C-alpha cells in the first residue's frame, strides 16, 4: 500500500472510523454505566471515565485494527 500511495488514505479512514466508534461507544457505555457525580467525587468520576474509555478503545482496536 505504501508503494502505491494508498497507505496514508487508508490510515486516515481507519482513524476517522475509530474516532467515530469511540464517541458512540463511550456514550453508550455512559448510559449503561452512569458515572458518579463529578462534583462530589472527582477522582471516582475520573477513574470511571478512564475505565469506560479503555473499554471502548479495546472494542475499537479489536474490531478495526487486529482483524
Image: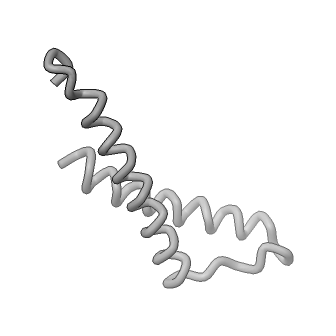
Residue 14 % position (x, y): 31, 45
Name the residue at 70% across, 62% down: 46
Taking the view exactly as shown, the residue that stands out farthest to the right is 40
Find residue 25 and report its horizontal and vertical position in percent: 43, 68
- Quadrant for residue 10, please give it: top left
Left or right of 7? Residue 18 is: right
Residue occupying image coordinates x 48% and y 63%: 23
User: Looking at the image, what colour scheme do you see?
Assistant: one colour
At 16% from the left edge and 15% from the top edge, which residue is drawn?
Answer: 3
Q: Is residue 46 left or right of residue 3?
A: right
Q: Is residue 2 above or below residue 35?
A: above
Against 12, is 57 above or below?
below
**Left or right: 8 in relation to 24:** left
- Identified at 85% across, 75% down, the residue is 39
Q: Residue furthest top?
A: 3
Residue 9 point in image, percent of width and height = 28, 33
Residue placed most toward the observer, 48 or 56: 56
**Quadrant of the image occupied by residue 35:** bottom right
1 relative position to 19: left or right: left
- Foreground residue, 51 or 13? 13
Is residue 48 positioned above or below 57 on the image? below
The N terminus lies in quadrant? top left
Amino acid at each position: 500500500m505504501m508503494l502505491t500511495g494508498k497507505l496514508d488514505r487508508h490510515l486516515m479512514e481507519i482513524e476517522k472510523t475509530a474516532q467515530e466508534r469511540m464517541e458512540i461507544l463511550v456514550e453508550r457505555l455512559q448510559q449503561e454505566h452512569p458515572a458518579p457525580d463529578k462534583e462530589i467525587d472527582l477522582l471516582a468520576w475520573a477513574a470511571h471515565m478512564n475505565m469506560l474509555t479503555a473499554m471502548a478503545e479495546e472494542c475499537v482496536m479489536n474490531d478495526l485494527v487486529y482483524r
